[in-house]
Image (cartoon, helix red, strand yellow):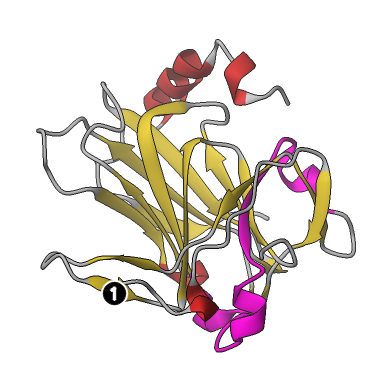
Amino acid sequence: MMHPSQRVRAAVLSTTIAAAVAACSDAATTGPSARSTPSGSFAQAVVASSGGTTAPVLRRTTPLANDVVVYATIQPGQKGANAVSVKIKEAGLAISFPWNAVKAPTTVKITAYAGDLVSYSFEPHGIVFDTLVKVQQDLSGTSAYKDDALRKTLVGAYLDDDQDDIDANGIATMTETFPIYYNESDPTGQTKLTPSVAKFSTRHFSGYIIATGRGN
């Protein structure tokens, strides 16, 4: 798989997937497939991009029995409109698309893979959004829940070859890593801390995981 910056066919791929699900409504559908500054404990872990490095994938305490797939069509919005959130509740995953993430209706496919690894495929692979989209992982169903030390080591990570970049022991070869944060501002402007939800931002889609052992 080529790096997103090299994929000149991203727009074509997006259009193809959109056509394939044209019969679906714009609402997401789910189903199994075949296969104030925060305390130091929760401060943002600053980790630089690091192609080709390895780390264990965060594990779920209860494995997913099947792959779970969600399709949703993201529409361009009016300036200042609320972000559109696409969720896979079984996996504790939510992806938020700001109003200006796309210029035309774009259908996305999100897959949470069966098993105990916190591992996903975000498609169309290679698509680049016009602004950052936010990925949120609920940690309550993972080994990082209520574990301050482990939470501090988490990063979001992009896998160039999706699941092929994870070996039989759950060790991933990461093309790029993204800092995890646990704090954000609520609508009143106050800073709030949510240590049970790991968040990171990206502008492109491919294989993604939450990895451990890479934070500060």
Q: How many marks?
A: 1
Q: Name the foreground residue: 165 vs 41.
A: 41
Residue toward you, 138 or 198: 198
Residue extending furthest toward the top: 8
- Which residue is more in the foreground, 148 or 203? 148
Please give the name of the residue rendered at 64% of the width and 55% of the height, measured from the top-left corner: 209
Compared across the picture, whether 205 is left or right of 108 comes to right
Q: Secondary structure at mark 1?
A: strand
Q: Residue at x 13, y 64 (%)?
A: 187
Position of 143 with respect to 71 (left or right) is right
In the displayed structure, 41 sits above or below 12; it is: below
**Pointer 1: residues within 10 angstroms few (<14), some, or many (20+)?**
some
Picture quarter with the N terminus? top right
Residue 66 in view, yes or no: yes
Q: Is residue 195 magenta?
A: no
Q: Position of residue 97 (x, y in %)?
A: 31, 43
The answer to if 154 sits in the magenta stretch is: yes
- Height in image: 9 above or below 181? above
Q: Along the horizontal axis of the image, is 123 left or right of 36?
A: right
What residue does disc 1 label?
A: 192
Which quadrant is the C terminus positioned in? bottom right
Viewer-proximal residue among 25 and 47 = 47
Q: Position of residue 214 (x, y in %)?
A: 72, 61
Instruction: Name the image quarter holding residue 26.
Output: top left
x and y percentages locating residue 80 in the rendered image: 11, 40
Residue ID at (20%, 67%): 186
Q: Is residue 143 visible?
A: no
Q: Please state the extent of the stretch shown in magenta in the rendering.
A: 138-166
Q: Position of residue 109 (x, y in %)?
A: 47, 42
Q: What residue lies at 30% left-to-right and 27% top-to-bottom? A: 102
- The amino acid type, in three-letter code, at marker 1 is Lys
Q: Residue 216 vs residue 163: left or right?
A: left
